Image (spheres, rainbow, N blue to C red):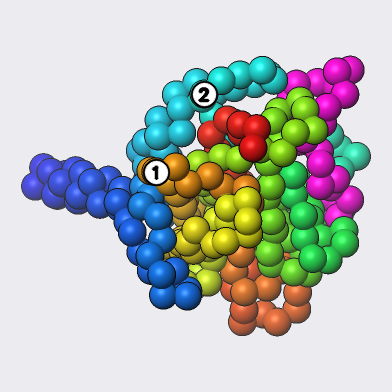
Amino acid sequence: MQTKTLLNKLMATILICFAITHTACKKDNGTAAPPADVLSASGDSLSIAPVLNQFRSLLGDSLNTAPGKVGGRREINWDAVPATFQDNNNFPSDFFAQTDAALPNGRKRGAVFTTSLSNDMRISSKSFDDVYTGFAAQFKVFSHRLVLGAMNGNVIDVSFKVPGQATDATIKGFGVIFLDVDKEQKTSLEFFDAAGKSLGKFFAKASDSKFSFLGVKFKDSSLVSKVRITAGEEGIAAITSYNDKVGMDDFLYDEPVAK
């Protein structure tokens, strides 16, 4: 009906308007976090697309695909990962932080991933259905066909290099498309400066078997050296069925710059 269509358009507009939050929230230690633009959305791919594109513009409208760039942004959707590192737990932490001139530019995006457990990151072409049958129905793919999961733990730290170099770098904004966030206040991004001081912790919205986008861009001179991703309550391969397991698809961040 026409009335219903107009109402749906109005609600969509309201959701988009409230997706951007200019925040100076309290950190866990009670002190004020630096002001930041916090963008979040949940639902199907069409529902989150407007907010995702807004965050891309905040980071920089130029999508950088080679080293030596100034400004703009980087994105990782995992589809540059070869079959050798798919559907096993052998994904190299520095896969997207290579410096060898002979390697393709797609592997020079300045992002390093670490976990507290060894061999704990899995790039899946099956939406983890080979880990537990039925997971493909829960972990929908946002872009192309590969997704990321932490297997036994649920925390991944991301640090930064100047793309194509071994030089430590910082960013100002970072976002993730999470998959199948079932519970509120469990999936988060926490940002740290070069001294290891937390700049704030921010939570993704729940959206069962769909997508939850969360992106944060700091507004002042705050520089981010590390982002800690907490994906749900436990790893994809953990066996406690009632705990929330969360996958990941696209990562987005502004061009890393030398410290």
Q: Quadrant of residue 57?
A: top left
Local crowd at mark 1 within 10 Å, few (<14), some, or many (≥20)? few
Q: Which residue has dot 1 on it?
A: 220
Q: Which residue is nearer to you in this view: 244 or 253?
A: 253
The amino acid beneath tag 1 is Asp
x and y percentages locating residue 184 in the rendered image:
45, 71
Q: Which residue has dot 2 on it?
A: 71
Q: Residue at 69% across / 47% down in the picture?
A: 159
Position above or below: 90 against 228: above
Looking at marks 2 and 1 on the same chain, the residue that comes earlier in the sequence is marked by 2
Query: Which residues fall within the magenta stretch?
Result: 87-110
x and y percentages locating residue 92 in the rendered image:
85, 45
Q: Residue at 83% across / 66% down in the picture?
A: 117
Residue 41 in sight in this render: no
Q: Residue at 50% across / 41% down in the picture?
A: 172
Q: Quadrant of residue 105?
A: top right
- In the rendered structure, the answer to whether residue 223 lies left or right of residue 229 reads left
* Figure label count: 2
Q: Residue at 72% across / 39% down in the picture?
A: 168
